[in-house]
Amino acid sequence: MLLELKHFQIPPGERILLKEVTWDEFEQILEELGEHRASKIAYHDHILEIMTPLPEHERNKEIISDLIKILLEALDIEFDTLGSTAFKNELMQQGIEPDNCFYIENEARIRGKERLDLTVDPPPDLALEIDVTSRTHREIYALLGVPELWRFEKGELQISVLENGNYKEVEYSPHFPHFPLKKNVPYYLQKIKKIGRNKTIKEFKQWVNEQLKNL
């Protein structure tokens, strides 16, 4: 019998695990939860995880997403961002909601689509995960074939690329090879706490332009 999950109260920073969840039950639960909610899901090996982020998690997600957008715009690269869209592949029995995701190389292939099905559509080119109290499900992203994964945890940015089915941490993002982001993304996140968002974003844009001049 399908659980009435909409009646569950999951405090921020907490999670629940449901075991032996079939694909049909997973689809039903997603429908019951709806799209407009604070919680996030991950589905792997018939285990469904539902968690509710903390405010710190959401703040870092928004800021890092803004920095990625600024970089792509400065490089004049067309992109689409789909936020915490639920990415599912029934054939692989996998499902995940990233904190944010970006279609870059494959933007044209999903342009204008209202719904995505990873059995036929490409996965995002870059996924972002903020680990404050949750954990990054690398195995799900790997199985879905997401080429690049960013993970921000304890003030540090990890950038990983998919190689032979596994993620390998790298120093520079393949999408932004001329920008030392592992050092500078945490720096600007800290700066926002001192001087505010608008001034920090302005400084970040200036830094990006300086890097481009040196290419």
Image (cartoon, grey):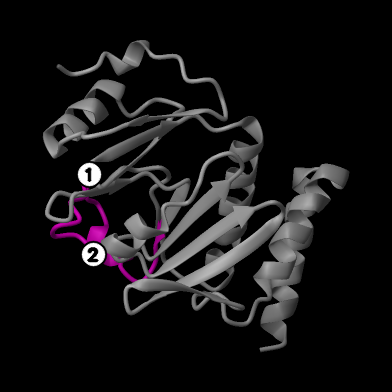
- Is residue 24 shown above or below 141? above
Q: Residue furthest bottom?
A: 215
Q: Position of residue 215 (x, y in %)?
A: 66, 89
Identify which residue is drawn at 18% across, 18% down.
2
69 up-or-down from 31: above or below:
below
Q: Which mark is residue 109?
A: 2
Q: Secondary structure at mark 1?
A: loop
> Does the image show residue 167?
yes
- The amino acid type found where label 1 is placed reads Glu
Question: Looking at the picture, how far across and down is residue 109, in whole percent?
Answer: 23, 64
119 or 64: nearer the viewer: 119
**Would you say 151 lies left or right of 190 here?**
left
Residue stretch rendered in magenta on the structure: 102-121
Q: Is residue 63 left or right of residue 116?
A: right
Q: Is residue 53 above or below residue 80?
A: above
Q: Is the residue marked by circle 1 packed among few (<14), some (14-19), or many (20+) residues within 10 Å?
A: few
Which x, y percent locates residue 66?
59, 52
25 and 126: which is toward the camera: 25
Q: Earlier in the sequence, mark 1 or mark 2?
A: 2
Q: Quadrant of the N terminus?
A: top left
| Residue 114 inside the magenta-drawn segment | yes
Q: Which mark is residue 114?
A: 1
Residue 17 in the image: above or below residue 137: above
Q: Quadrant of residue 183?
A: bottom right
Write down the quadrant of residue 142 in the picture: bottom left
Q: Is residue 69 visible?
A: no
